[in-house]
Amino acid sequence: MPKMKTHRASAKRFSFTKSGKVKRAKAFKQHILTKKTSKRKRNLRKTGYASTSETKIIRQLVPYK
């Protein structure tokens, strides 16, 4: 059986912890930042984690990580 191809966009966006969680960047940090508070922007810098249902899908997209 041939190897599965890695979804390159997903491989660039997600990384995995040793416990199997999927790390991701938080959304809403790219533009229109003037109306957002400093506290909100600071919290958007932190890492987020994908939910368990999304983790299953991401694992299929990035099989060899």
Image: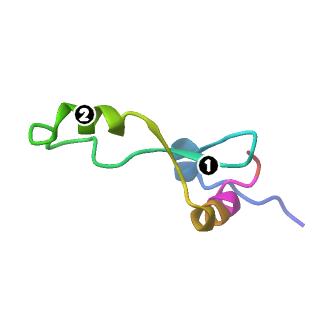
Q: Name the residue nearer the viewer: 21 or 15.
A: 21
x, y percentage for residue 32? Answer: 14, 43
Residue on which the image places disc 1 = 22
Counting residues from the start of the chain, the first of labels 2 and 1 encountered is: 1
Residue appearing at x 67%, y 65% in the figure = 56
Residue 12 falls left or right of residue 44: right
Magenta stretch prevailing secondary structure? helix
Q: Residues in magenta?
A: 58-63
| Image disc number at residue 39 | 2
Please tell me how crowded label 1 is: few (under 14), some (14-19), or many (20+) other residues with Cα within 10 Å.
many
Q: Residue most toward the front?
A: 39
Measure the alpha-carbon separation of dots 2 and 1: 24 Å
x, y percentage for residue 4? Answer: 76, 60
Please tell me how crowded label 2 is: few (under 14), some (14-19), or many (20+) other residues with Cα within 10 Å.
few
Q: Amino acid at mark 2?
A: Lys
Residue appearing at x 34%, y 36% in the figure = 43
Asked if the magenta segment contains residue 28, the reply would be no
x, y percentage for residue 59? Answer: 69, 58
